[in-house]
Image (cartoon, rainbow, N blue to C red):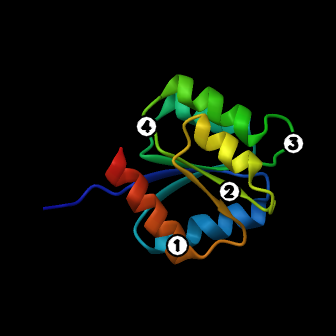
Amino acid sequence: MKTKKIKVLLIDDEEEFILALARRLEFRGYLCKTAGDGESGIHLMENEPFDIALIDLMMPGLNGLDTLRQIKTINQNLPVILLTGDKPIKNGMAGMRMGAFDYLIKPLDINVLIEKIQSALDCA
């Protein structure tokens, strides 16, 4: 029996980071789609289903919190993990109040990220 691969939407304006993260997740069996900004990520969400989204908080244009807000209007039940390079956690906490499952500080430990993804999917 074939198991369903988990489909991850990655939204981050740091192209090298997001491509490297997608490769690392795909190596571990996830299916990934990337978007370089909030608007593109929302467009992807409107056109195909995802199991989870990882969103950078600090992006030009539509920031991570605005992107989260719009994604939650499209799919209120989609688990979202916020990513930030900022040490102050107020935006991460604000995102959780808006419905994000959790937030992680960059640079990411891939094993911690995978544990968070699995926890978010288990709670969904």
Dividing the image into 4 quarters, which one contains the C terminus? top left
**Residue 36 visible:** no
Do residues under tags 4 and 2 come within 8 Å of each other at their CB atoms? no
Of circles 3 and 4, the one toward us is 3
Q: Which of marks 4 and 2 is nearer the N terminus?
A: 4
* Residue at the image position 45 percent from the left and 59 percent from the top: 117
**Residue 91 visible:** yes
**How crowded is the residue under tag 4: few (<14 C-alpha within 10 Å), some, or many (20+)?**
few
Element under disc 1: helix
**How crowded is the residue under tag 3: few (<14 C-alpha within 10 Å), some, or many (20+)?**
few
Residue placed furthest toward the left: 1
Q: What amino acid is found at the position of numbered circle 3 in the picture?
A: Pro
Give the labeled residue for mark 1. Answer: 112
Q: Earlier in the sequence, mark 3 or mark 4?
A: 4
Q: Which of marks 1 and 2 is nearer the N terminus?
A: 2
Do residues under tags 3 and 4 come within 8 Å of each other at their CB atoms? no
Q: How far apart are marks 3 and 1 (CA)?
A: 27 Å
Do residues under tags 3 and 1 come within 8 Å of each other at their CB atoms? no
Q: Which mark is residue 83?
A: 2
- Front position in the image: 14 or 102: 102
Element under disc 3: loop
Of circles 4 and 2, the one toward us is 2
Q: What amino acid is found at the position of numbered circle 2 in the picture?
A: Leu
User: Would residue 123 be found to the left or right of residue 98 on screen?
Assistant: left
Element under disc 2: strand
Q: What amino acid is found at the position of numbered circle 4 in the picture?
A: Pro
**Above or below for 120 versus 115:** above
Give the labeled residue for mark 4. Answer: 49
